DNA sequence: AAATTATAAATTATCAATAATCTATAATCT
DNA sequence: AGATTATAGATTATTGATAATTTATAATTT
């Protein structure tokens, strides 16, 4: 019996909460629920054929993600994100990712850095494929995987947890970057970043990251 | 009728969840619940004279704080924090607070910075009093208020939310810093930081902050 | 005796019903 | 009329009971 590898193998038991959370999230993405709209527990309970409890928990999750705001006894609403909110979000994300790059470049030994770079290049390849096929969904997932890989390499769980919370992919799964030009530009940024990390060039890496995330933010704001 | 100032005045309606969350947290602080121990919903429901639902929600909150880990259908346990966990936590906190100081110094205009400094000095005074009276609880609360004030001044809600999550005060309300010597050292750090901000001396401010938080971390690890 | 399978106890997840609270509308008062 | 106070309807918060799942223990098999 050689199973039970840490925590990865576990948590596969499905709990309603997750599905409910996704359902409400999708409704927000689809524009069915607009910023400011109320999220009524009993409505979603009936809609999804479950009871109120799990819906409550799902809403709490969305709240922790920053997608929803709740006032006790009054209810929950879809948060309306101002341009400032988005800017704040990205500025914190840049802060966290800069740190992860700094930590990776400064603390990882050669084999570990090599391993990270290899992983980044693998993801890069997969992104090329997704971009070629026009599969936006997997492209954005791989984009997240790319950035997460760097943070993973630092081994800092706190950093990872906080980053997950300000990764806007959680807010808007698909964004305005539907055109091929944006994708190519993103890819160029990823490549440049990978090379900078490979060469332990901290200055170039952080500058590239800032450019990369800032242009991503701009496309959100404009789109 | 001149109430309803934004969001501060609201959320005063008590919800069980908060009290339950605090009760369990206190049990962890008191050593009643040790790392690895299970947190049983029905036990706490009976213990506190409430039902299972609110207890579940409270546990979810503690989970989001990183104090507890949960596996579906198996239950929740108090997370065991390694020294590395604590170090990671502080290194992220330093990252976030450095950013807030940088943003404050670079972006605030003179009146706004003046206002921040005034507020910091007020808190500083209150801390002197608490320290003199040996009131550890209010001292730690004011310490948190001091750091929060800087982040508040930047107006970045995302930064604030993430900072709340890696503020270890949430984990260990009272720490090992019971001796008067540590308190004086902390206070000296606060004062120096306040002056550096007042003079817009970014280098001094961040260096002071790093020292300050690092020594705080050390006292946690040693204590 | 070791391993496997059944059973029982404990615990979590969910439900359905009720209590508490808020919101909007109607009634009352000055 | 304008403001204040009741009332009704909607929604959240909580409860107590039940179903689903896991864990520990006993029974069975080989």
Image (tube, coloured by chain):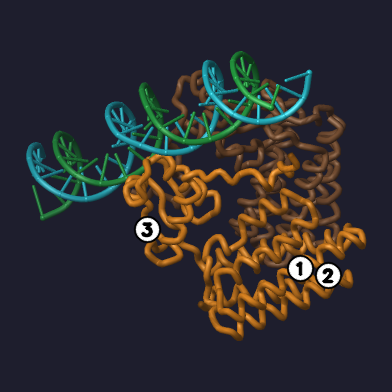
Chain colours: A brown, B orange, C green, D cyan
Q: Secondary structure at mark 3?
A: loop
Q: CA distance from mark 2 to mark 1?
A: 10 Å
Which residue extends farthest bottom? B181
Looking at the image, residue B205 lies above or below residue B74: below
- State the residue in front, A143 or B134: B134
Q: What's the CA distance linking mark 3 and mark 1?
A: 40 Å
Q: Mark 3 and mark 2 in contact? Answer it, CB < 8 Å.
A: no
Q: Please give the residue where the numbered disc 2 appears in the rendered image.
A: B197
Q: Nearer the viewer, mark 3 or mark 2?
A: 2
Going 69% across and 32% down the picture, which residue do you hit?
A: A173
Q: Quick one: label 3, few (<14), some, or many (20+) residues within 10 Å?
A: some
The residues tagged by marks 3 and 2 sit, at their Cα atoms, a distance apart of 43 Å
Q: Tell me if I can see residue A23 in this picture.
A: no
**Comes first in the chain, label 2 or label 1:** 1
Disc 1: which residue: B120
Q: Position of residue A101 (x, y in %)?
A: 74, 58
Q: Marks 3 and 1: which is nearer the front?
A: 1
Answer above or below: position of B188 versus B41: below
Check disc 3 and report the residue beneath it: B37
């Amino acid at each position: 019996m050689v199973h039970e590898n840490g925590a990865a193998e576990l948590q596969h038991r499905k709990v309603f909460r997750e599905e409910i959370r996704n359902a409400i999230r999708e409704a927000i993405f689809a524009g069915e629920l607009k910023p400011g709209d109320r999220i009524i527990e009993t409505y979603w309970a009936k809609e999804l054929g479950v009871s109120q409890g799990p819906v409550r928990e799902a809403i709490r999750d969305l709240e922790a993600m920053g997608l929803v705001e709740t006032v006790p006894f009054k209810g929950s609403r879809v948060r309306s994100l101002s341009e400032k909110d988005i800017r704040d979000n990205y500025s914190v994300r840049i802060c966290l990712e800069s740190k992860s790059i700094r930590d990776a470049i400064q603390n990882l030994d050669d084999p570990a850095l090599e391993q990270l770079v290899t992983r980044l290049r693998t993801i890069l390849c997969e992104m090329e494929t997704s971009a070629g096929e026009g599969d936006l969904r997997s492209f954005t997932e791989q984009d997240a995987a790319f950035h997460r890989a760097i943070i993973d390499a630092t081994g800092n769980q706190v950093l990872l947890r906080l980053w997950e919370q300000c990764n806007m992919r959680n807010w808007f799964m698909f964004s305005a970057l539907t055109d091929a030009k944006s994708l190519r530009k993103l890819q160029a940024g990823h490549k440049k970043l990978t090379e900078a990390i490979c060469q332990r060039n901290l200055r170039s890496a952080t500058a590239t990251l800032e450019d990369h995330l800032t242009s991503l933010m701009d496309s959100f704001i404009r789109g």
